[in-house]
Image (cartoon, grey):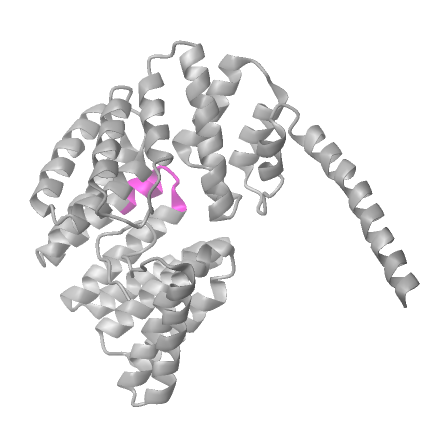
Amino acid sequence: MKKLLVFFLMILTLSAQTQTPVIDSVRKSLFPNFNPATSALLLKKDKNDPIIDTALQQLAKTTNPKERATFLAQIIDQRLLGASFDQKTADILFKVLLKELVSLKRQLNHPDYEAYKSHYEMATMEENSYNWKNTQRFELMKQTIELYDQFNKPILNLLSALRGYFNSLNLQEERFTYYEQKLRLYTLKNNRPNMAACYYGLGGYYNTKAAYNRAISHYLKAADILKDINKIGQFSNGLNVAAQEYAFWGNYQRAKELIDSSISIGMNLMNKTILKASFGSAAEIAIVSNRWTESIAYCDSSLKYSTTKNDFDYFPILFARKGICLIELGKLSDGFKNIEIAEKIVDSIKKPFYSAQGTIETDYGKFL
């Protein structure tokens, strides 16, 4: 038995020794112009996306500073990494690639160097990204946006993330003024992605005032822009948030029509992210309308499509919704079991969770 164990360990050692050169060879052939740590991260790509694949291939082929800066800016500006990597890897890669881009911008004396530098400082700030009361990060994000605005950059994600700070710091009137002014600027410059983000921000403001008709109008304007610029996933999100506003307003039929449209988009594209969010929104709408059994079915459908590492954060919301519905149906034991599952997931990750209006909107946090 002892000899057999020694033999087995020798095989494992040899296997590890032969595997490492193979991995290094693949890494060097696919990503020859990245350092080993970065190319190792790039090998973790778990989904194919034509846009990010093309950008990475172009980066891999060149050492020219101007060309690398161009391709890196494309990846950073359009936040492409989330389409091909799990969230943790995408976040690390984003910072790594942004750091190289900042260095190249400085080397090339590009006028937008300060904007990317500010973005990097914000991205690497040591803080919990779910701490929406961090005023230092809030101010740095606004500074970064101002610097990008000098070059009319599309920064939909940054403008969208800023809403969470306005909301958590209870700066609703300041939020309204900020997005009203930004919307005028971006309309003048025809920066449509940024216009969509502003419509989202204003929609959230009107929601806090229970002005659901105005909130719906702004969310649908955002959705129309996102559809026109082929941001289909975010267009679907716009339908979801508008549908939830209709439900809050008491118009379940219209809410159902919009949610069904969003689900159809997901089904036609077989896009699990869209389906997860759409069924999740449908579950919330059913709860608002006291349709407990429907909501449970929608939660189960959302869980069915929540299959990636990025979806783990969404599980507590779905289990909590199921728990609420089961309790309303008088199934107390099953209801509390689902709520306990939600609590265990929250405790295991050690960060707050919220149910948001779709996959972008962060205005309506309901912490578990």
Residue located at (35% from left, 23% from top): 117
Against 109, is 322 above or below? below
The N terminus - image quarter: bottom right
Residue 221 against residue 112 in the figure, above or below:
below
Of residue 127 and residue 310, the one placed in the foreground of this image is 127
Q: Is residue 226 magenta?
A: yes
Instruction: Specify the farthest residue to the bottom.
Output: 330
Give me the residue at 48% from left, 57% from top. 272
Membership of 291 in magenta stretch: no
Position of 58 with respect to 203 (left or right) is right
- Which contiguous range is marked in magenta? 223-232
Residue 289 vs residue 362, the one in the foreground = 362
Residue 131 horizontal/vertical position (percent)? 27, 49
Q: The C terminus appears in which quarter of the rendering?
A: bottom left
Left or right of residue 150: residue 184 = left
Depth check: 41 or 256 in front? 41
186 to the left or right of 96: left
Quarter of the image holding residue 103? top left
Q: Residue at (16%, 45%) from the top-left corner?
A: 202
Q: Quadrant of residue 297?
A: bottom left
Where does residue 116 sit, x and y in percent of width and height?
Answer: 36, 24
Task: Give x and y (percent) for residue 137.
Answer: 26, 37
Q: Residue at x 24, y 63 (%)?
A: 366
User: Does residue 96 appear in this view?
Assistant: yes
